[in-house]
Amino acid sequence: MKFAAFTTVAASAGEATQAADILDNLRQQTVLAEELGFEAIWLGEHHFGLYGAGDLPNPILLGADLAARTSRIRIGQMANIATWWHPIRLAEDLAILDNMTRGRVEVGFGRGVWPYEGPQFHPNADPRLDRQNRELFQETVEIVRKIWTEEFFSHRGENYTFPAADTVFSHPSYPPDPVWHEDGKVTRLRVTPRPYQKPHPPLWMTVSTDRSVSTAAEMGLRACYWQPPPRRIRQRMELYAEVRSRLEGETFAIGQDQAVMRSTYVSTSMEQARREAESGIMSAFIFNDPFRGRDVFTNPDEELDSTVRLDWDFLEPRTLLVGSPENVVERIEELQEVCNLDYLLVEFAHAGIPLRHTLLNLENFGTKVMPRFSG
Protein backbone atom coordinates (compact mmCIF):
# COMPACT_ATOMS: atom_id res chain seq x y z
CA MET A 1 0.00 0.00 0.00
CA LYS A 2 1.24 3.49 -0.86
CA PHE A 3 0.87 6.49 1.44
CA ALA A 4 1.15 10.15 0.50
CA ALA A 5 1.03 13.37 2.49
CA PHE A 6 -1.54 16.04 1.59
CA THR A 7 -1.83 19.65 2.73
CA THR A 8 -3.57 22.92 1.99
CA VAL A 9 -0.85 24.68 4.02
CA ALA A 10 -2.86 25.30 7.17
CA ALA A 11 -1.17 27.80 9.48
CA SER A 12 0.45 26.76 12.77
CA ALA A 13 -1.09 28.31 15.87
CA GLY A 14 0.72 31.41 17.05
CA GLU A 15 3.94 30.41 15.29
CA ALA A 16 3.53 31.23 11.61
CA THR A 17 1.53 34.31 10.75
CA GLN A 18 3.59 35.35 7.72
CA ALA A 19 3.49 33.50 4.42
CA ALA A 20 7.28 33.06 4.48
CA ASP A 21 7.11 31.29 7.85
CA ILE A 22 4.20 29.08 6.76
CA LEU A 23 6.19 28.01 3.70
CA ASP A 24 9.25 27.30 5.85
CA ASN A 25 7.06 25.01 7.94
CA LEU A 26 5.88 23.19 4.83
CA ARG A 27 9.48 22.66 3.74
CA GLN A 28 10.22 20.99 7.09
CA GLN A 29 7.12 18.84 6.76
CA THR A 30 7.96 17.75 3.22
CA VAL A 31 11.57 16.84 4.03
CA LEU A 32 10.33 14.78 6.98
CA ALA A 33 7.68 13.09 4.81
CA GLU A 34 10.39 11.99 2.39
CA GLU A 35 12.58 10.69 5.25
CA LEU A 36 9.62 8.69 6.58
CA GLY A 37 9.01 7.04 3.20
CA PHE A 38 5.85 8.78 2.00
CA GLU A 39 5.23 8.25 -1.71
CA ALA A 40 4.29 11.85 -2.52
CA ILE A 41 3.43 15.28 -1.20
CA TRP A 42 0.15 16.63 -2.62
CA LEU A 43 -0.75 20.33 -2.49
CA GLY A 44 -4.18 21.95 -2.76
CA GLU A 45 -5.10 25.22 -4.49
CA HIS A 46 -7.13 28.02 -2.88
CA HIS A 47 -7.35 31.79 -3.23
CA PHE A 48 -8.47 34.94 -1.37
CA GLY A 49 -8.18 33.65 2.22
CA LEU A 50 -11.57 34.54 3.63
CA TYR A 51 -11.05 32.21 6.57
CA GLY A 52 -7.37 32.86 7.18
CA ALA A 53 -5.84 29.46 6.42
CA GLY A 54 -5.21 27.14 3.55
CA ASP A 55 -4.34 29.68 0.88
CA LEU A 56 -2.10 28.14 -1.76
CA PRO A 57 -2.61 29.99 -5.05
CA ASN A 58 0.08 28.17 -7.03
CA PRO A 59 0.86 24.57 -6.01
CA ILE A 60 3.00 24.14 -9.15
CA LEU A 61 5.38 26.93 -8.17
CA LEU A 62 5.64 25.69 -4.60
CA GLY A 63 6.16 22.17 -5.91
CA ALA A 64 9.30 23.38 -7.69
CA ASP A 65 10.68 24.67 -4.40
CA LEU A 66 9.89 21.44 -2.55
CA ALA A 67 11.35 19.33 -5.35
CA ALA A 68 14.65 21.21 -5.05
CA ARG A 69 14.86 20.25 -1.36
CA THR A 70 14.08 16.56 -1.88
CA SER A 71 15.27 13.75 -4.12
CA ARG A 72 12.67 10.97 -4.14
CA ILE A 73 9.23 12.06 -2.99
CA ARG A 74 6.78 12.71 -5.80
CA ILE A 75 5.27 16.17 -6.19
CA GLY A 76 1.52 16.37 -6.79
CA GLN A 77 -1.36 18.81 -6.86
CA MET A 78 -4.75 17.78 -5.49
CA ALA A 79 -5.79 19.70 -7.30
CA ASN A 80 -4.96 22.32 -9.87
CA ILE A 81 -8.40 23.86 -10.36
CA ALA A 82 -8.45 23.59 -14.13
CA THR A 83 -11.28 26.07 -14.57
CA TRP A 84 -9.11 28.78 -12.97
CA TRP A 85 -6.11 28.28 -15.27
CA HIS A 86 -5.36 29.26 -18.84
CA PRO A 87 -4.83 25.83 -20.46
CA ILE A 88 -1.62 26.69 -22.30
CA ARG A 89 -0.04 28.17 -19.19
CA LEU A 90 -1.17 25.17 -17.14
CA ALA A 91 0.37 22.72 -19.62
CA GLU A 92 3.62 24.71 -19.84
CA ASP A 93 4.10 25.13 -16.09
CA LEU A 94 3.39 21.48 -15.32
CA ALA A 95 5.72 20.32 -18.08
CA ILE A 96 8.50 22.52 -16.74
CA LEU A 97 7.99 21.09 -13.23
CA ASP A 98 8.03 17.54 -14.61
CA ASN A 99 11.37 18.23 -16.34
CA MET A 100 12.81 19.99 -13.28
CA THR A 101 12.03 16.90 -11.19
CA ARG A 102 12.95 14.38 -13.92
CA GLY A 103 9.54 12.80 -13.75
CA ARG A 104 8.45 13.10 -10.12
CA VAL A 105 5.19 14.93 -10.90
CA GLU A 106 1.60 13.77 -10.34
CA VAL A 107 -1.09 16.04 -11.80
CA GLY A 108 -4.51 16.45 -10.20
CA PHE A 109 -7.38 18.44 -11.71
CA GLY A 110 -10.49 19.83 -10.05
CA ARG A 111 -13.52 21.93 -11.06
CA GLY A 112 -13.62 24.21 -8.00
CA VAL A 113 -16.29 24.34 -5.32
CA TRP A 114 -16.38 27.88 -3.88
CA PRO A 115 -18.50 30.44 -5.76
CA TYR A 116 -16.32 33.34 -4.55
CA GLU A 117 -13.21 31.91 -6.22
CA GLY A 118 -14.18 30.61 -9.67
CA PRO A 119 -15.80 33.68 -11.27
CA GLN A 120 -12.69 35.76 -10.60
CA PHE A 121 -10.75 33.67 -13.13
CA HIS A 122 -13.29 32.84 -15.83
CA PRO A 123 -17.02 33.62 -16.10
CA ASN A 124 -17.79 29.94 -16.72
CA ALA A 125 -15.71 28.78 -13.72
CA ASP A 126 -18.56 29.60 -11.34
CA PRO A 127 -19.61 26.18 -9.88
CA ARG A 128 -23.19 27.45 -9.67
CA LEU A 129 -23.19 27.37 -13.49
CA ASP A 130 -23.02 23.59 -13.55
CA ARG A 131 -23.09 22.95 -17.31
CA GLN A 132 -20.69 25.77 -18.17
CA ASN A 133 -18.28 24.82 -15.38
CA ARG A 134 -18.17 21.17 -16.46
CA GLU A 135 -17.66 22.12 -20.11
CA LEU A 136 -14.83 24.49 -19.18
CA PHE A 137 -13.18 21.82 -17.03
CA GLN A 138 -13.30 19.14 -19.71
CA GLU A 139 -12.17 21.52 -22.43
CA THR A 140 -9.21 22.76 -20.37
CA VAL A 141 -8.02 19.22 -19.60
CA GLU A 142 -8.51 18.24 -23.26
CA ILE A 143 -6.30 21.13 -24.38
CA VAL A 144 -3.58 20.24 -21.85
CA ARG A 145 -3.55 16.67 -23.15
CA LYS A 146 -3.36 17.84 -26.76
CA ILE A 147 -0.41 20.08 -25.95
CA TRP A 148 1.42 17.20 -24.29
CA THR A 149 0.75 14.54 -26.92
CA GLU A 150 0.77 16.45 -30.23
CA GLU A 151 3.85 18.19 -31.62
CA PHE A 152 1.60 20.86 -33.11
CA PHE A 153 -1.94 21.37 -31.87
CA SER A 154 -5.07 23.33 -32.63
CA HIS A 155 -8.37 23.60 -30.81
CA ARG A 156 -11.84 25.01 -31.39
CA GLY A 157 -14.20 24.92 -28.43
CA GLU A 158 -16.84 26.76 -26.45
CA ASN A 159 -14.30 28.60 -24.32
CA TYR A 160 -11.00 28.59 -26.23
CA THR A 161 -9.76 28.75 -29.81
CA PHE A 162 -6.10 28.10 -30.62
CA PRO A 163 -4.42 29.53 -32.56
CA ALA A 164 -6.26 32.77 -32.03
CA ALA A 165 -7.91 34.16 -35.14
CA ASP A 166 -5.56 35.85 -37.61
CA THR A 167 -2.38 34.71 -35.84
CA VAL A 168 0.53 35.47 -38.20
CA PHE A 169 4.22 34.64 -38.00
CA SER A 170 7.11 35.55 -40.23
CA HIS A 171 10.79 34.87 -39.57
CA PRO A 172 13.63 34.14 -41.99
CA SER A 173 14.81 31.19 -39.88
CA TYR A 174 11.38 29.53 -40.03
CA PRO A 175 10.09 29.20 -43.58
CA PRO A 176 6.40 28.44 -44.12
CA ASP A 177 5.49 24.86 -43.25
CA PRO A 178 2.04 23.43 -44.07
CA VAL A 179 2.15 21.48 -40.79
CA TRP A 180 1.56 24.71 -38.89
CA HIS A 181 1.51 27.60 -41.35
CA GLU A 182 -0.68 28.28 -44.40
CA ASP A 183 -1.19 31.42 -46.51
CA GLY A 184 0.73 33.54 -44.04
CA LYS A 185 -1.34 32.44 -41.04
CA VAL A 186 -0.47 30.12 -38.16
CA THR A 187 -2.81 27.12 -38.15
CA ARG A 188 -1.30 25.08 -35.33
CA LEU A 189 0.83 25.88 -32.26
CA ARG A 190 3.90 24.14 -30.90
CA VAL A 191 4.10 24.36 -27.11
CA THR A 192 7.32 23.53 -25.28
CA PRO A 193 8.64 21.88 -23.27
CA ARG A 194 6.98 18.47 -23.44
CA PRO A 195 6.70 16.58 -20.13
CA TYR A 196 9.60 14.41 -18.97
CA GLN A 197 7.22 11.48 -18.35
CA LYS A 198 5.83 9.97 -21.54
CA PRO A 199 3.30 10.65 -22.79
CA HIS A 200 2.68 12.79 -19.69
CA PRO A 201 2.52 12.57 -15.87
CA PRO A 202 -0.25 10.54 -14.20
CA LEU A 203 -3.50 12.51 -14.31
CA TRP A 204 -5.99 12.61 -11.43
CA MET A 205 -9.36 14.22 -10.70
CA THR A 206 -10.95 15.03 -7.36
CA VAL A 207 -14.41 13.42 -7.22
CA SER A 208 -17.33 13.67 -4.79
CA THR A 209 -20.47 12.51 -6.66
CA ASP A 210 -21.52 9.70 -8.98
CA ARG A 211 -21.47 12.19 -11.83
CA SER A 212 -17.91 13.35 -11.18
CA VAL A 213 -16.78 9.72 -10.79
CA SER A 214 -18.27 8.93 -14.21
CA THR A 215 -16.62 12.02 -15.69
CA ALA A 216 -13.20 11.00 -14.35
CA ALA A 217 -13.60 7.48 -15.75
CA GLU A 218 -14.84 8.74 -19.13
CA MET A 219 -11.84 11.07 -19.39
CA GLY A 220 -9.39 8.37 -18.30
CA LEU A 221 -8.39 10.31 -15.20
CA ARG A 222 -7.51 8.59 -11.94
CA ALA A 223 -9.99 9.39 -9.16
CA CYS A 224 -9.40 10.67 -5.62
CA TYR A 225 -12.13 10.69 -2.95
CA TRP A 226 -12.14 12.67 0.29
CA GLN A 227 -15.25 12.74 2.42
CA PRO A 228 -17.50 9.71 1.75
CA PRO A 229 -17.48 6.73 4.14
CA PRO A 230 -16.02 3.41 2.94
CA ARG A 231 -19.22 1.76 1.68
CA ARG A 232 -20.10 4.83 -0.41
CA ILE A 233 -16.56 4.91 -1.79
CA ARG A 234 -16.87 1.24 -2.68
CA GLN A 235 -20.06 1.94 -4.62
CA ARG A 236 -18.36 4.71 -6.57
CA MET A 237 -15.22 2.68 -7.16
CA GLU A 238 -17.43 0.01 -8.74
CA LEU A 239 -18.99 2.67 -10.98
CA TYR A 240 -15.56 3.97 -11.96
CA ALA A 241 -14.27 0.50 -12.79
CA GLU A 242 -17.39 -0.32 -14.82
CA VAL A 243 -17.17 2.86 -16.93
CA ARG A 244 -13.45 2.58 -17.64
CA SER A 245 -13.68 -1.13 -18.40
CA ARG A 246 -16.52 -0.53 -20.85
CA LEU A 247 -14.91 2.41 -22.61
CA GLU A 248 -11.33 1.12 -22.76
CA GLY A 249 -12.03 -2.55 -23.44
CA GLU A 250 -10.00 -3.93 -20.56
CA THR A 251 -10.89 -4.99 -17.05
CA PHE A 252 -10.32 -2.41 -14.30
CA ALA A 253 -10.29 -3.81 -10.78
CA ILE A 254 -12.09 -2.16 -7.87
CA GLY A 255 -9.68 0.41 -6.47
CA GLN A 256 -7.43 0.49 -9.54
CA ASP A 257 -6.32 4.03 -10.47
CA GLN A 258 -8.15 5.39 -7.42
CA ALA A 259 -7.12 6.91 -4.10
CA VAL A 260 -8.71 8.17 -0.89
CA MET A 261 -7.73 11.22 1.13
CA ARG A 262 -8.44 11.38 4.86
CA SER A 263 -7.98 14.04 7.55
CA THR A 264 -5.53 12.38 9.93
CA TYR A 265 -4.15 12.89 13.42
CA VAL A 266 -2.21 10.14 15.21
CA SER A 267 -1.63 10.54 18.93
CA THR A 268 -1.41 8.34 22.02
CA SER A 269 -5.18 7.92 22.35
CA MET A 270 -8.48 8.98 20.84
CA GLU A 271 -9.03 11.34 23.75
CA GLN A 272 -5.72 13.13 23.28
CA ALA A 273 -6.18 13.32 19.51
CA ARG A 274 -9.57 14.93 20.04
CA ARG A 275 -8.21 17.45 22.55
CA GLU A 276 -5.38 18.51 20.26
CA ALA A 277 -6.95 18.29 16.80
CA GLU A 278 -10.74 18.54 16.92
CA SER A 279 -10.94 22.27 16.28
CA GLY A 280 -8.40 22.23 13.46
CA ILE A 281 -9.82 19.19 11.69
CA MET A 282 -13.44 20.32 11.98
CA SER A 283 -12.59 23.68 10.40
CA ALA A 284 -12.18 21.83 7.07
CA PHE A 285 -15.81 20.68 7.12
CA ILE A 286 -17.65 23.87 8.07
CA PHE A 287 -18.37 24.72 4.43
CA ASN A 288 -20.04 21.42 3.53
CA ASP A 289 -23.42 23.09 3.87
CA PRO A 290 -24.36 24.25 1.30
CA PHE A 291 -21.50 23.69 -1.17
CA ARG A 292 -20.59 19.99 -0.92
CA GLY A 293 -23.65 19.11 1.11
CA ARG A 294 -24.28 16.63 3.93
CA ASP A 295 -25.19 13.66 1.79
CA VAL A 296 -21.55 13.18 0.78
CA PHE A 297 -21.08 11.53 4.19
CA THR A 298 -23.88 8.98 3.77
CA ASN A 299 -23.65 5.30 3.00
CA PRO A 300 -25.81 3.78 0.23
CA ASP A 301 -29.53 3.78 1.11
CA GLU A 302 -28.94 6.08 4.09
CA GLU A 303 -30.76 9.35 4.71
CA LEU A 304 -29.65 11.79 7.37
CA ASP A 305 -32.11 13.10 9.90
CA SER A 306 -32.38 16.89 9.77
CA THR A 307 -31.04 17.08 13.33
CA VAL A 308 -27.73 15.38 12.49
CA ARG A 309 -24.76 17.68 13.03
CA LEU A 310 -21.51 17.39 11.09
CA ASP A 311 -19.47 17.17 14.28
CA TRP A 312 -16.58 15.00 15.46
CA ASP A 313 -18.80 12.20 16.78
CA PHE A 314 -20.61 11.93 13.46
CA LEU A 315 -17.57 12.26 11.19
CA GLU A 316 -14.95 10.26 13.12
CA PRO A 317 -16.24 6.77 12.25
CA ARG A 318 -17.09 7.78 8.68
CA THR A 319 -14.27 9.89 7.30
CA LEU A 320 -11.46 10.59 9.82
CA LEU A 321 -8.24 8.75 10.64
CA VAL A 322 -7.68 9.87 14.22
CA GLY A 323 -6.71 8.52 17.61
CA SER A 324 -4.06 6.01 18.59
CA PRO A 325 -2.03 4.14 15.96
CA GLU A 326 -4.30 1.16 16.57
CA ASN A 327 -7.42 3.26 15.88
CA VAL A 328 -5.93 4.55 12.63
CA VAL A 329 -4.72 1.13 11.49
CA GLU A 330 -8.21 -0.26 12.04
CA ARG A 331 -9.79 2.44 9.86
CA ILE A 332 -7.25 1.89 7.07
CA GLU A 333 -7.83 -1.86 7.21
CA GLU A 334 -11.54 -1.13 6.77
CA LEU A 335 -10.77 0.91 3.64
CA GLN A 336 -8.62 -1.93 2.33
CA GLU A 337 -11.26 -4.55 3.01
CA VAL A 338 -14.26 -2.61 1.72
CA CYS A 339 -12.66 -0.65 -1.13
CA ASN A 340 -9.60 -2.68 -2.11
CA LEU A 341 -7.69 0.53 -1.46
CA ASP A 342 -3.98 0.66 -2.26
CA TYR A 343 -3.27 4.43 -2.20
CA LEU A 344 -4.07 6.72 0.74
CA LEU A 345 -3.48 10.48 1.01
CA VAL A 346 -2.99 11.67 4.59
CA GLU A 347 -4.04 15.25 5.38
CA PHE A 348 -1.63 15.87 8.23
CA ALA A 349 -1.59 19.66 8.89
CA HIS A 350 -4.66 21.28 10.40
CA ALA A 351 -5.46 24.91 11.17
CA GLY A 352 -4.33 26.12 14.57
CA ILE A 353 -2.20 23.09 15.46
CA PRO A 354 1.39 23.92 16.47
CA LEU A 355 4.17 22.86 14.13
CA ARG A 356 5.67 20.46 16.67
CA HIS A 357 2.37 18.57 16.85
CA THR A 358 2.05 18.54 13.06
CA LEU A 359 5.54 17.07 12.70
CA LEU A 360 4.80 14.53 15.44
CA ASN A 361 1.57 13.59 13.67
CA LEU A 362 3.56 12.87 10.49
CA GLU A 363 6.20 10.95 12.44
CA ASN A 364 3.62 8.88 14.33
CA PHE A 365 1.90 7.94 11.10
CA GLY A 366 5.17 7.17 9.33
CA THR A 367 6.68 5.08 12.12
CA LYS A 368 3.64 3.52 13.87
CA VAL A 369 1.05 3.13 11.10
CA MET A 370 2.77 2.77 7.73
CA PRO A 371 4.97 -0.18 8.78
CA ARG A 372 1.81 -2.18 9.50
CA PHE A 373 1.05 -2.12 5.77
CA SER A 374 4.56 -2.60 4.39
CA GLY A 375 3.74 -6.11 3.16
Image: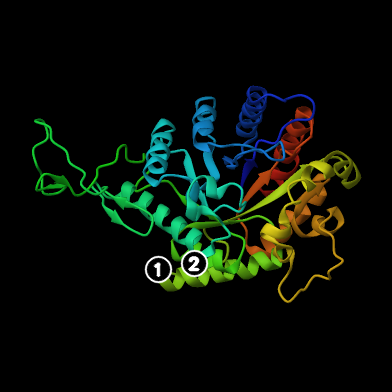
Q: Secondary structure at mark 2?
A: loop
Observer-side mark, 2 or 1, equals 1
Toward the right, the furthest residue is: 271
Q: Are marks 2 and 1 in contact (CB under 8 Å)?
A: yes
Estimate the x, y position of residue 90 in percent, counting from the top left. Answer: 42, 42
Name the residue located 70 percent from the left edge and 38 percent from the top edge.
Answer: 366
**Is 165 on the left or on the right of 38, as rendered?**
left
Q: Secondary structure at mark 1?
A: helix
Q: Which mark is residue 252?
A: 2
The residue under label 2 is which amino acid type? Phe
Estimate the x, y position of residue 185 in percent, counting from the top left. Answer: 15, 46
Q: Quadrant of residue 173?
A: top left
The residue under label 1 is which amino acid type? Glu
CA gap between label 2 and label 1 equals 9 Å
The answer to which of 337 and 197 lies nearer the viewer is 197
Number of labels in the image equals 2
Name the residue located 73 percent from the left edge and 60 percent from the top edge.
Answer: 334
The answer to which of 250 and 316 lies nearer the viewer is 316
Name the residue located 64 percent from the left edge and 30 percent from the top edge.
Answer: 26
Disc 1: which residue = 248
Q: Is residue 251 visible?
A: no
Estimate the x, y position of residue 96 in percent, counting from the top left. Answer: 39, 34
The answer to which of 2 and 204 lies nearer the viewer is 204
